[in-house]
Image (cartoon, grey):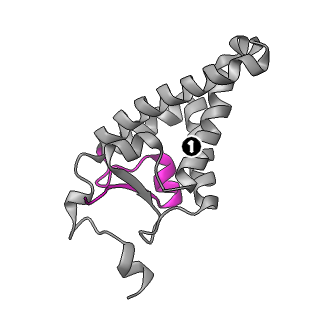
């Protein structure tokens, strides 16, 4: 069995892999934002509480590492795991550390440039596989996990 046939789900043959993924990604994003804020609150004392003055930047940096490490360690953030979804690459395989880094970098750029984030959200709502801007650029997609 080749890696492609072993991993790759296909919308035509397995539509339940994509069912509800966009809303699940939204809920996972909210969960992850709360987790990142809590991690930032834990980091604040180590900045002598000066992190309060640059809290959005602190959120971006802590969020970057949170997303990168969780995506590299299982193709899903903790929020995504809670919602039963995972990212896959263009072959359907789990994300490598390098691809997780690239996805996190793309997401971080999108989150700092509001029009890009808006475009990404719209794409998730209108594309057949619920892919955002970074997903389309990298060939990644979020799918439901079979239990």
In the shown orientation, is residue 139 left or right of residue 44? left
| Image quarter (top left, top right, bottom left or bottom right) of the N terminus | bottom left
Picture residue at 37% right of the left edge, 79% below the top: 6
Picture residue at 63% right of the left edge, 30% below the top: 60
Secondary structure under badge 1? helix
Picture residue at 30% right of the left edge, 47% below the top: 21
Q: Position of residue 100 (x, y in %)?
A: 58, 54
Judging by the rendered image, the residue that carries numbered circle 1 is 67
In the displayed structure, 37 sits above or below 87; it is above
In the shown orientation, is residue 94 left or right of residue 1? right
| Image quarter (top left, top right, bottom left or bottom right) of the C terminus | bottom left
In the shown orientation, is residue 10 left or right of residue 136? left
Residue 7 visible within the image: yes
Report if residue 137 lies within the magenta region: yes
Q: Position of residue 107 (x, y in %)?
A: 55, 42
Residue 106 visible within the image: no
In the displayed structure, 53 sits above or below 139; it is above
Q: Residues within 10 Å of mark 1 (few under 14, many from 20)?
A: many
Q: Which residues are magenta?
A: 126-147
Which is more toward the observer, 53 or 135? 53
Which is more toward the observer, 73 or 86? 73
Q: Position of residue 31 (x, y in %)?
A: 42, 31
Report if residue 58 lies within the magenta region: no
Which is more toward the observer, 1 or 18? 1
Q: Position of residue 106 (x, y in %)?
A: 59, 46
Number of residue marks: 1
């Amino acid at each position: 069995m080749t890696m492609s046939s072993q991993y790759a789900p296909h919308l035509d043959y397995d539509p339940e892999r994509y069912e509800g993924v966009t809303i699940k990604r939204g809920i996972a994003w909210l969960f992850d934002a709360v987790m990142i804020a809590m991690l930032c609150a834990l980091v604040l004392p180590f900045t002598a509480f000066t992190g309060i003055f640059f809290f959005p930047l602190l959120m971006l940096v802590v969020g970057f590492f949170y997303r990168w490490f969780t995506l590299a360690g299982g193709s899903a953030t903790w929020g995504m795991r809670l919602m039963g979804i995972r990212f896959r690459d263009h072959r359907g395989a789990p994300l490598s550390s390098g691809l997780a880094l690239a996805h996190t970098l793309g997401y971080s750029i999108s989150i700092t440039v509001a029009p890009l984030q808006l475009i990404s959200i719209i794409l998730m709502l209108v594309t057949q596989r619920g892919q955002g801007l970074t997903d389309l650029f990298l060939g990644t997609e979020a799918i439901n996990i079979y239990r």
